[in-house]
Amino acid sequence: MKLTEEQLKAKLFSKLQKDYNAFLDKLLNGDRELLKSSVKELSVKSDMMLEFEYFFPLDGKSLRSVCNKKKPLDFLYKEWQKDDELRTEDFHYAISEIAEREANRIAKQNSEPER
């Protein structure tokens, strides 16, 4: 059964929340150095979560491309971190761009003939 867009959004938000909570648990149960070295990551992931909670930035293929990730928040953070163009405070734009790129990558991969 194919999920509706609203069901996919709920599923993704649940996965994001689980990913975020696991990250917070790791920080809270880690040592002081881990917490100090993770301040930027905590800030960015928190901002990304707020974006999803109040201004859900994804739909269609982009939504599916992120929803299919095992750890979607970690995926978004790592992609954001490695792309200077996306390392902006406009997380709505960054998330949308990352997801669109991933959707295009998946579409291209699926359209290539097997070797």
Image (spheres, rainbow, N blue to C red):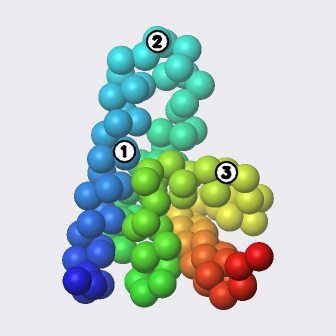
Residue 66 visible in the picture: yes
Any mark on residue 81, and which? 3
**Percent coordinates x, y for residue 66 in the rendering:** 47, 67
Q: Looking at the picture, does residue 27 appear above or below residue 17?
A: above
- Residue at image position (30%, 51%) is 17
Q: Looking at the picture, does residue 81 appear above or below residue 109?
A: above
Any mark on residue 20, and which? 1
Q: Earlier in the sequence, mark 1 or mark 3?
A: 1
Q: Looking at the picture, does residue 87 appear above or below residue 43?
A: below
Q: Amino acid at mark 3?
A: Gln
Say which element carries label 2: loop
The alpha-carbon separation of the residues under discs 1 and 3 comes to 16 Å
Q: Earlier in the sequence, mark 1 or mark 2?
A: 1
**Percent coordinates x, y for residue 57 in the rendering:** 43, 76
- With 83 as the anchor, is 32 left or right in this view? left
The alpha-carbon separation of the residues under discs 3 and 2 comes to 23 Å
Say which element carries label 3: helix
Q: Residue furthest front?
A: 115
Q: Earlier in the sequence, mark 3 or mark 2?
A: 2
Say which element carries label 1: helix
Residue 97 visible in the picture: no
Q: Amino acid at mark 2?
A: Asp
**Quarter of the image where one finds residue 75:** bottom right
Q: Looking at the picture, does residue 73 appear above or below residue 98?
A: above
The alpha-carbon separation of the residues under discs 1 and 2 comes to 18 Å
**Quarter of the image where one finds residue 72:** bottom left
Q: Amino acid at mark 1?
A: Tyr
Viewer-nearest residue: 20 or 2: 2
Quadrant assignment for the N terminus: bottom left
Circle 2 is placed at which residue position?
31
- With 105 as the anchor, is 31 left or right in this view? left
